[in-house]
Structures are given as C-alpha cells and as structure tokens.
Amino acid sequence: MKEKPMASWKGSERHGEELLDCLTIIFKSAGCSWSKCRMCSYRHERYGEQSCEALLGHLRAQLTWILAEYNVADFRMVKIFTSGSFFDPVEVPPAFLDDIATTFRGKLVIAETRPEFIRDETLQPFIEKLDDGSWKMPLYCAVGLETSSDEIREKCIMKGFTFAEFKTAARVAHAAGAGIKAYLLHKPLFLTEKEALEDMKRSIRDAMEHAEIISMNPCTVQRRTELEFYWKRGAYRPPYIWSVLTLLEDSPVHMTCDPLGGGQKRGPHNCGKCDYELVKGIRDYSLNADRELVKALLETECDCRNEWEYVLSNEKPYCMPLTR
C-alpha cells in the first residue's frame, strides 16, 4: 500500500542554543477523539471507521513513504502531528508508537497530544525504545494549551480540558522523563485585540512554569470551522502583527512563532504594506532568538501602527472587530 502522510517537510528548529535540522510529519489517523475546537479544521482529516489492523496498515504505509522520501540520518529532530493526539490509542494504534520510536531512535521527538493521553504507561515504553542517550529529554509532549484561562479555553475555543489537567499532565510527563511543549493560541474567537494581548501575556507566564518550550500561534481562519463562520460575517479579525511582535518582545522566555497565513486576510495581518517584512522577521527571530531584531521590527514605520493603537484603546466586545 503506497500512501503519503497529509504533509511532511524539512526545516530548521531552535532547541536551547542549537539550531537543529528538523523533519515534520503530519500523519493521517483515525481522527481527533475530541473534535470540537472552534478554530480547527484538521479534525476533518481522518480515515473512516475501520479495524485497528487496517488503521495500523495505513499508518505504516505512510511511514514507509517517509523513509523512502527522506534520509533519517539528515535530521536530529522529528516533529510528529496527527489530526488530534499521537498518544491516543484509538487514533493511533500502540503498535505504531513502537514503530516510530524504533525508526527515530536517537532523535529528539516532539509529538502532539491532548493532556488526557499523557500517561506513564504510554510514555515509559516509548521513551525506552527512543532514547539512546543523545538527549537529556528525548521526547517532548506538545500540548495545545492555547491559554491559561479556563474561561477563554472553554468558551472561545471549546478545548475540553482545564489548566489543572494540563499541569497534571506536565507532572506525569516530567516523571516519565519527557518534556512539555505548550502551544498558545493568540486571539481566539470572541476576544478583542486588547483582551487577546492581555490573555497571551498572562498565559505565557503561567505556561512557562510547567513547559520547557513555548510556541505561540497567532490565530488563522481555517476552512470548515466555526471560526470561519464568524469571520465570513465580519465578526472576527485575526490578530495584528503588531500585537504578535509586542508579545514576543514582552515574553520572559524565548518563544517560537510561525505566523501561518501571515499578511493574508485569513491570517495575522496589518495593512498589507508592512506585513511581509514583519512576518519574515518573526520567523527569523524564532530561529535566532535575537530580541534586538524584535525591537527593530517594532520600530518599523507604517501608518497602520496608529490604527492598531486606536483599536487597542477603543475596540469593545460589543463593537468588534473595528477593522477587517
């Protein structure tokens, strides 16, 4: 069976003081068990109902394609995503976890999962097969925490877990010898620009107590989502890139940030004139961690900065968004 993953690509990723060659893979799986987040379209990408054996066959076929397409020896880091959670046994058969750990033994693996699937009995055998002593933490569980506010996570995102549950999962991961990467979502549905900015500042400080790595994702309007429904009716605007830069400068720790759709209507954007330069600078900063670069980007002269400052001061929940 010849089958491709949903996506795969090679790139670079900053880890500590190092820049690592990284292979990213998005496997098509049985689909997210939760499948309710307002902004997520990946939950639609799944195989139909089938046996565990058939699903395992599909996943192994995708892995075979990866091994034929890429030379594993070229990469020190591997990032693994699915439509939901890599460690969900219903979505990804446990036998495939063994395949991944064996195939990428000695690599630094970052695998996305919801917190309820971070269990000692799952992580321990995976790490034992993966670890060859090359890394202090060979595995990082990447969790879409999105925000440290339970109210925002539930009402604006509908994520289905609490900050307390995230903290418990972090303790379990650390006890098993794994690290935590926290994904934060900047400006989910229903928040003003200022509310979103304040929420992220608070969330970064709350998350850094439990996660070794933090990545901020400025919200993008994906197709076939509830977020898109509101956006098409003029009830949502993705964040300004000025806000993203402010958060990067203010953060007490280095955060990675890849503004998907940056400069486009569906993604984080300013006016269209300054977007390309600023988005490129943010991606450069994710790799070089140079705070002076962020400060220089914030000093970029563009008329839309006045617009952004006006929005921060005057936008209210009952009259948003003020701009498109």
Image (cartoon, rainbow, N blue to C red):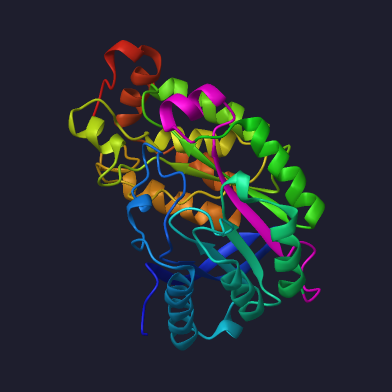
Residue drawn at x 51%, y 58% as measured from the top left: 90
Q: Compared with residue 191, is residue 99 higher up or lower down, i.e. above or below?
A: below
Spot occupied by residue 230 in the image (x, y as percentages of width and height): 25, 30
Q: From where the camera sits, is residue 53 visible?
A: yes
Residue drawn at x 45%, y 77% as measured from the top left: 57
* In magenta segment, residue 297: no
Q: Nearer the viewer, residue 87 or 251?
A: 87
* In magenta segment, residue 145: yes
Residue stretch rendered in magenta on the structure: 132-159
Q: Which corner quadrant of the image does residue 121 belong to?
A: bottom right
Residue drawn at x 62%, y 36% as measured from the top left: 251
Residue drawn at x 29%, y 19% as measured from the top left: 320
Spot occupied by residue 282 in the image (x, y as percentages of width and height): 47, 49
Spot occupied by residue 294 in the image (x, y as percentages of width and height): 52, 43
Q: Compared with residue 28, is residue 147 higher up or lower down, i.e. above or below?
A: above
Q: Nearer the viewer, residue 9 or 323?
A: 9
